[in-house]
Image (tube, rainbow, N blue to C red):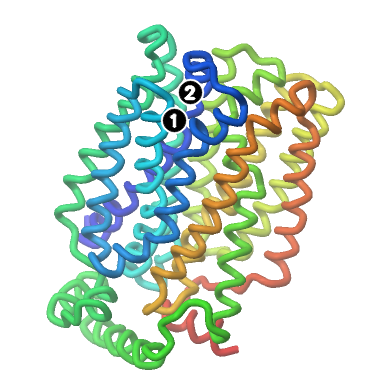
Amino acid sequence: MPKTFKWILVAALSGFLFGFDTVVISGANLPIKELWSTSPIFHGFFIMSMALWGTVIGALFGSLPSNRLGRKLTLSWIGFFFFISALGSALAIDPYTFSLFRFIGGIAVGISSVTAPIYISEMTTSQNRGSLGVLYQFSLVFGILIAFFSNYILTGFDGDNDWRWMLGVEAIPALLYFLMTLYIPDSPRWLLLFKNDDTTAKKVLKEIYPNQIEADAVLKSIRLTDIDNSVESKLFIPRFKKTVILAFFISFFNQLSGINFILYYAPEILEMGGFATKESLFNSVIIGLTNIVFTFGGLMLIDRLGRRQLLTIGSIGYIIGLGGVSSAFYFDLSPQLIAFFIFTFIAAHAIGQGTVIWVFISEIFPNRIRAMGQSFGSGIHWVFAALITLLGPSVIEIYNTNPWPIFAFFAFMMILQLLFSIFIMPETKGKSLEEINEIINTK
């Protein structure tokens, strides 16, 4: 196994912790609501979305440690934060302590969504950047699957304390991840642009590009692009307007698909559809399996079909899945049909937005502002994720008899995403990071 693949795999594994931490709360949702007798508003803000507010902070400011400490050290801190969050959440004695440690875990998720995709994009060639970039998303959905499965098998394990085990078990992979990050190098672009360490950068580049001529050409390209952008290291300037707009809309539509709403509240939604509690948790495992199978499909296709075509395919699947769920609730159809359309929605997300978003955002910004751009895109993503999750309990309470309008709204938003992918989004497959910068920001 090549060294570079091992390094990329370690960085991608932060996605596992990201995915696990994001949805593990779904199994603890109802037990915590009963334990601490939380109101819908309190539960939405402190229990369900506090981690997401931490994620917003981590995403918006994730470029600071990524640039100042380096990609490697930042990834190590992410593992440490996940470890502390898992133990603290599991041992919490009240909702406020619980929320604090969930907030810390959220910060780790936010910084991970900035730093890991950047690291991967800077450690790959233009030919395999898409598929290797999707390893992060693949790890993410694998983490989601394991979290759903863990919640399922831990139900009934320790009675009223089941939820503590569900949350606490994350400490084990977090510690292992922290130890693995100690043995990866920093990316050559960071070493060149922020540390001025040409010697180490050349060594890492030789591992990525075994052909010396190609490695030298990439080194020259990085330096030339840096000279071109060195006087424009701010994100919000006219030259980068198009890039900022692209990052905003792909992040905005990611959450307005309803993906986090469905992942967070999957057991509750399925119960509303007619499933028993244990059946709902089992169907959540099926959601995780569907996610990982179709993400693997996206991994295989992203460098063949491209980012734009996958997003278009995913958008069509979203519309079918969400429209189906809405119709099934509206006409009071069978629970199995509701579950089928939810699985269709998950498959569409996995092969479309789920595969594309982190790869695309990490590609479109110039070297000097890539971390800031990734922070912006991730920040937009998590602001809307937090808002949707915050409003989730209240919206579910309003439509507790029949939630069809919720899914109809998300379906309409995906019609808009389809138009975005067809008429606005550029294709980035097969191009170097420097070439993408030239195409988007000089037109």
**209 or 281: which is nearer to us?**
281
Residue drawn at x 60%, y 52% is 254
Looking at the image, residue 68 lies above or below residue 357: below
**431 or 277: which is nearer to us?**
277
Residue drawn at x 53%, y 19% is 33
Note whether residue 4 is visible: yes
Quarter of the figure with residue 321: top right
Asked whether disc 1 touches disc 2, contact meaning CB atoms under 8 Å apart, the reply is yes
**306 or 109: which is nearer to us?**
109
Q: Position of residue 8 (x, y in %)?
A: 29, 57
Q: Position of residue 88 (x, y in %)?
A: 30, 30
The residue labelled by disc 2 is 27
Quadrant showing the N terminus: bottom left
Quadrant showing the C terminus: bottom right
**117 or 231: which is nearer to us?**
231
The amino acid on which the numbered mark 1 sits, given as a three-letter code, is Val
**Which residue is the extreme one toward the right?**
331
Looking at the image, residue 215 lies above or below residue 41: below
Q: Position of residue 351 (x, y in %)?
A: 57, 50
Cα separation, mark 1 vs mark 2, equals 6 Å
Looking at the image, residue 229 lies above or below residue 299: below
Helix, strand or loop under label 2: helix
Horizontal side, residue 305 vs residue 100: left or right: right
The residue labelled by disc 1 is 24
Residue drawn at x 73%, y 45% is 410
